[in-house]
Image (cartoon, rainbow, N blue to C red):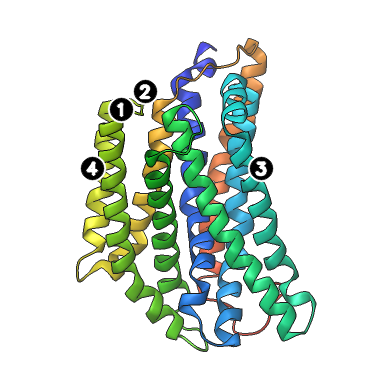
Amino acid sequence: MEIFASPLLTASLLGLFVVGYLVLAGSDVGLGMLMPYVTRTPEQRRQVVAAIAPYFLASEVWLVAAVGVMAGMVPDVEHVVIATLWPVLVLLLAAWLLRDAGLWFRARVDSSGWRSACDTAIVAGSWLLATSWGVALAGLLAGELTLSPFTVVCTAAVVSLFALRGAAFGAERLVGATEAESADVAARATRALARVALATVLLTVAVAVGLGVLPAVRVEAAVLLTAVAVAALAATTGPTGPMLSRHTSAVAIAVPGLIVALSVDLSVAQLPGMTGVFVWSMLLPTVPVMLLGQVWLYRMTRRPAAEPTFFA
């Protein structure tokens, strides 16, 4: 039963949930960020919201699962995260509520002014969410939350990765919509956003090395994962970038979460033997269900709804 208290097993599960959230939430948050760029008409904005709507609830399940694992199995890490990042966590929660309020209430009132206000909430909340995650990542890697050059460039890198993921998502999801120009605009944006993301990632690495601000990072793992992200982004900048972006954007946005997961020394709660068996017996069957459920949701809603829905 000692295996159920293995730090490696716990870190793997926590890393899976964090990466799952980033890859999935990057889609809807990123597309929300780009809504003013990829849409021109009210119908296009409705279709973007309809494309986002089925995904934002599913992606939040992964974040809730990560928080649950952290609170139940690595409470020391949870305390450190809250103590270190509480200001940005407050901002993140506010952004989360703002973005979700725009999605939930957009279709509740049949008024162009109301829909415009909700669209503004979606866009602003999405940008604040991406920015908050960038600042949080910088704080976790540096071991403290400070306004420094590393925080600025790391935040810019994470925001650009969210935007790239959203463009790749829109390029595929909006194909077949009534007004499909948004898909073409999103596809064209992937190459430019990949260049921005590549530049900011390399700049983040340079600043981190120059300032020596990453005391907790495991260098070998960070170098390998960064190389993977750079390769994925470089491939997206080429002529075939829009076709590859669905996969390369997912790989690139997963890397920051993996670096954090591999760099933090987990202090696993000493669960009594049978309690550990109980916790893992509940967790292990859940993960395949979450994965299969996400695949089913994607296949069921691969294209945005042509007619108005609950959300748009």
Q: Closer to the camera, 188 or 172?
A: 188
Mark yes or no: residue 272 visible: yes
Identify the image quadrant of the N terminus: top right
Query: Label 4 near label 1: C-beta < 8 Å?
Result: no
Q: Which mark is residue 90?
A: 3
Crowd band around label 2 with a 10 angstrom C-alpha radius: few (<14), some (14–19), many (20+): few
Work out whether mark 1 precedes mark 4 in sequence or the reverse, and give the earlier one. 1
Q: Nearer the viewer, residue 286 or 25?
A: 25
Amino acid found under the numbered disc labelled 3: Val
Q: Nearer the viewer, mark 4 or mark 2?
A: 2
Q: What residue is disc 1 on?
A: 212
Going from N to C along the chain, the mark reached first, 4 or 2, is: 2
Residue drawn at x 50%, y 71% is 302
Q: CA distance from mark 1 to mark 4?
A: 19 Å
Instruction: Pinpoint residue 301: horizontal percent, then vertical percent.
Output: 55, 70
Which residue lies under the disc numbered 4?
227
Marks 1 and 2 in Cβ contact (< 8 Å): yes
Q: Position of residue 241 (x, y in %)?
A: 26, 67
Residue shown at the point (48%, 56%) measured from the top left: 26
